[in-house]
Structures are given as structure tokens and as C-alpha cells.
Amino acid sequence: MLDIKELRNDPAKIKKAMETRNENPETIEKILILDEKRREIIQKADELKALRNQLSKSVAKLKSQGNHEEASKNIAESKNIGNQIKEFDDVLKEVEEEQNTILSHLPNIPSEQTPVGKDENENVEILKWGTPRVFSFEAKPHWEIGPDLGMMDFERASKLSGSRFVVLKSQIARLERALISFMLDTHIENGYTEVNVPFMVKRETMYATGQLPKFEEEAYKTTPDDMFLIPTAEVVLAGIHKDEIIEFSDFPINYCAYSACFRREAGSYGKDVRGMIRVHQFEKVELVKYTTKEKSYEELEKLTNDAENILKALELPYRKIQLCTGDLGFGSALTYDLEVWLPSYNAYKEISSCSNDIDFQGRRANMRYRNKENKLEYVHTLNGSGLAVGRTLVAVLENYQNEDGSVTVPEVLRKYMGGIERIFG
RNA sequence: GGAGAGGUGGCCGAGCGGCCGAAGGCGCUUGCCUGCUAAGCAAGUGAGGACUUACGUUCUCCGAGGGUUCGAAUCCCUCCUUCUCCGCCA
């Protein structure tokens, strides 16, 4: 959520920011008009309320003095004012609702460090790590490696659940579990607190992190309870301190969690249709940090680094890019994406997205802390995948495949696989 | 699912139609005192909005939303949530 005061004070800046994000800057004008209307009504209503309070107080006094005539006169007048107040309050409510609706659909303001650009083509590459393997045989995509081993089943998955689902079996199923354990263990060692989270949340939780109201189409919900299947553990980890005042000495708070993630992928027909790159349900280990205004960008570097270290430990070639304004996620001010090398795509593919949401979620979820002057400020939140487990599994299968169809188990995962070094059919 | 009891400021906790933004305590801040620390004494200390250059004025908020009333933390309704007991269950 953007700060209405900031919007009022410097609308030109916000308009510019929205333009770089391909948002319609006219929306800002609309908000300002509503805001002016709102303040006008508040002033009038408050005057009337002050008057009513005065009259009401006098009623008590007059009654105790036995002056019932004067009292009933004031009661009548107060009643009349009460009706006027109600009218103003009703209009105020409408105006506020309209303003909040627009405001809650507006994305965060990009950081000055975020490069301006229209779409993903203008993202900036920061670094490349590792070298894509040159195969001495024809490398297979994971949607062949898995099924050929008899451990990845798309047909039965669609029989059960429809398209964009996968059933994993045997050593590949275990490999995925190994990845989860490896990632969590590594993050715990680096100072994160493991959290086991609900996979279903209430509407207001989805709102707090910015998933709603704008992206309702993307979410799976249940009726009649109006619960949502989480699209990422971020929803839970970043909402866990909703409406709290956090102790300054607790910062930074570092959370990591494994969860299944559920996404409708409504807008991605025809995209990544093969394999398990884009499915409705996938596993992910998520990192979330809570910190102060002064430290959040510093913490973003750390968080991204923590995600990168998983890729390094798995010896998977990747590159790190910085998203431009046009490609930035809804709540983010600055985002690094990590992209892993996938032989089947002959390209780097997103496997982690690490963002500084600054005070955007803090304001939405009303999460604050007392600064050194004892004043309340909104917390800064950060989130990143550490990593998308399903895609990491794909990367391992494809990058570690052998000519005979087997897959070598990366060194760091072997202790989680009962010492198995190779997966055979 | 059934029965009952709760949700009040950073925390604990009183209040159950007007004198309540809310006693008291803890915590915190400042001052005094004390070799230091602790203890003690005194004062201050909720959040959000609107108006104002400012001093300040004013409104709203006692889980959330409606209602009754001249007036609601207090009465009524709905919802969320916590706890206890019963039932069911991985």
C-alpha cells in the first residue's frame, strides 16, 4: 500500500513511478480528487460531532440539575444533528472505500536503484556463475528423463487432477524431499528460523501481502469458507506479524519455510506447457526477512546471497539479474531474479525472485516498530525463494543426467538420499 | 458439531449507559536521590485522522462490522478469534 500523504505531497513523483511500471498515471488524479472530497466531508462531519458531543454532555448536567425542559430541547437538537452526521458518514464511507480500492490496486514505488525499462527484455544482468555443461550426447529434457526412469508421471497426474500437475515416484520423489531438507538445513545454519506454516489462509492474509485484491484470478479458493490456498509461503511468513508492534531488538527477523504452492496460472496458456516448470502445485522453500528502513537494502543483498548459495552448493550454473521497473512484482521496490541453466530450454530460467518490499506490506498489514526516537514506523519486509524446489529438481535432473539415462545425485544431497550416488531406472 | 466463558493501551488488568481514552500495576522516558548498579521518590508516557506556518483545536478507536440511544468499552445482532467441557477424527 502506498502512503496517501506521500501521494498528496508529491503526486508528480508517484505518477512518474507508476508510468515506469506501465500503470495508468491518471489513477493518481482520481485518488487525489477522492482524497480532497474525503477531507471536506471529514471536516464537516467532525464539526457536527463536536457539537453533538457538547449537547449530549449538557443533557447529563441539565438532568441532574432538574432542568428537564432544557434537557429535552437539547435532546431534540442533538437528534437532529445525529441524522445529519449519519448522512455525512455514509458518504464518507463510500468515498473512503472507493479510494482504498484504487489505492490497494496500486503497486509499490520502484527503488531508485531499479533500472527503468518496459518489460523483461530490459532487465539487467548482474552476474553469471558456473558454466553450462557441454553434453557429449544428446541431452534429454526432464519431461523425458523422469518418465524414462519411470519416476515422473504426467499422464496419471492429469487423470487425477488435470493438466499442469505431476506425480513423482521413487528416487525422484525422494530427491525432491532431499532438496527441501538440504535447503532448510542450510538456511537454518545461516540464521533463519524454520517455520511450519498453514497452506490455507484467510482473505485478509492474502490482502496483507498484496496478493489480493488485484490477483484474485490467480488464486485457488474454497467455498463456502472463503479460504485461499497459498501461492507462496511468503503470504504466511510476511503476514505472521500482522497488526503487531515488533521490538526493535528483534531485528532482523529471518524466517524460512517449506510449503506447497498453488497457482491457477490463469494468464499463462501456452507458456511452459511441457514438463513441470509451470504447474498448479509445486514445492518451494521461502525466505522472509523483517527489518528496519535503514537496513532493508543491505538485507536484500544478504537474502539474495543466501539463495545463491544453494545454487552454488548444488553446482548449478545460474545468472543473477536485476528486474527493471516494467517487470517488477506488485509489492517490490527492488528485485533480483536468479535464473538457473536449463539444457531443455537452452536458456536460463527463473528459480528465485528476491525482493525488497520496503514498507509496502508493513503498511498494508499494519506491522510497526519503534525507532530510536521511540516513534512508530512501518517495518520493511523482504522475501525470496530459497529456492523453488520443483524447478531445482528439474535443473538437477537435466544438468546431472548421464548418457545411459541415469542421473547423478549432487554431492550435497547424498546424505539425504541414504548415500545414493546415482538414480537408475 | 454441541454447551459455557472470554477478547480493553507495549504488557497485565479494572470498568458493564454520561464525570471513561479509559483506575491500578508492570514496562518505558526524564528529574531527584544514591561511590557504581539495584532499590526509593516525583513527573510524564496509546494509536490514527482532519484543521493550523505554529502554539493548539477537534474527531475516531476498548476483537471486526451493524443496530438501539440525545449519549455506548458498557445494551442488542452478526462475524472473527481464544480458552474449558462433550462429541467426532488423522
Image (cartoon, coloured by chain):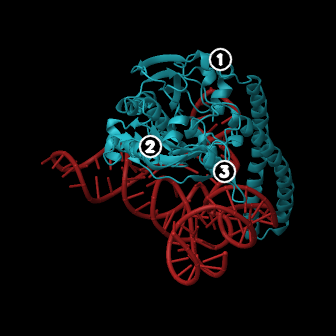
Amino acid marked by disc 2: Gly
Answer with left or right where residue A49 lies relative to residue A256: right
Spatial separation of the CA atoms under disc 2 and disc 1: 46 Å
Query: Which numbered mark, 2 or 3, is in the foreground of this view?
Result: 2
- Return the disc, 2 or 3, that comes first in the chain's sequence: 3
Chain to which mark 1 belongs = A
Between B85 and A395, the residue placed more toward the observer is A395
- Identity of the residue drawn at 53% across and 41% down: A147
Q: To which residue does mark 3 refer?
A: A159
Q: To which residue does mark 1 refer?
A: A118
Whole-percent x, y for residue B24 in the image: 44, 64
Among the chains pictured, the one given red colouring is: B
Q: Colour of chain A?
A: cyan
Amino acid marked by disc 1: Lys
Answer with left or right where residue A348 lies relative to residue A55: left
Chain to which mark 2 belongs = A
Between A407 and A263, the residue placed more toward the observer is A407
Query: Which numbered mark, 3 or 1, is in the foreground of this view?
Result: 3
Between B75 and B45, the residue placed more toward the observer is B75
Q: Secondary structure at mark 3?
A: helix
Q: To which residue does mark 2 refer?
A: A425
Whole-percent x, y for residue A367 in the image: 53, 44
